[in-house]
Amino acid sequence: MSFTLTSPAFAADHDIPSDYTCEGGDVSPALAWTGAPAGTKSLALIVDDPDAPDPAAPKRTWVHWVLYNLPADLKRLPEALDRDSLPAGALEGTNDWNRTGYGGPCPPVGRHRYFFKLYALDVTLPDLNHPTKAALEAVMAGHVLAKAELVGKYQKARTGE
């Protein structure tokens, strides 16, 4: 069975509804997964946008969400997950707004891709004190059993036309 990540909010390679963006409620979409491999001790989630700031000339990958130590037996995250509703043991990292928690799509120009990446790890990580994506990836190196990915797209509504 393959490791698969889905959302009831949007289909793979389709538009992310504005409810989950800076133009809406800016809340995280519900996510669900199946097929975590045997030996999984924890899960980590990274959401990022490799098209920043402009998909025609990307200069960096913008990090929207970093979560780790999600319990291995967990199968879903609810919509609008926040610090108070994190699963037991789960920890947050720092996004590129220099804060913890989910920050939804808010592209300055163009249609961007948002990668929701879920990693099955063979360890439970120590408390990394709100790591960045890069710091989390460095600690995860050598411990990733499988990776599931869901891509959504978003472009801000045009105003003033």
Image: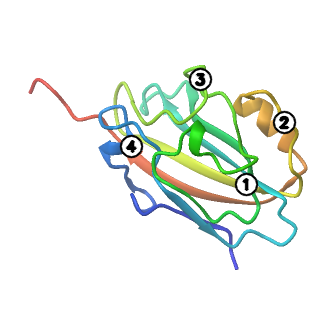
The picture quadrant where one finds residue 129 is: top right
Most distant residue in the bottom direction = 1
What label does residue 99 carry, if any? 3
**Earlier sequence position, callout 1 versus callout 2:** 1
Give the Cα separation between the discs numbered 1 and 3: 22 Å
Q: Residue type at mark 4: give it.
A: Tyr
- The image shows residue 47, relative to residue 134, as above or below, that is below
Residue on which disc 4 sits: 20
| Label pair 1/4, CB-CB below 8 angstroms | no
Judged from the image, the secondary structure of the residue bearing numbered disc 3 is: loop
Residue at image point 79% right, 55% down: 42
Q: Amino acid at mark 2?
A: Ala
SS for callout 2: helix
Q: Check disc 1 and report the residue beneath it.
A: 119
Label 4 sits on a secondary structure element that is: helix
SS of the residue under disc 1: strand
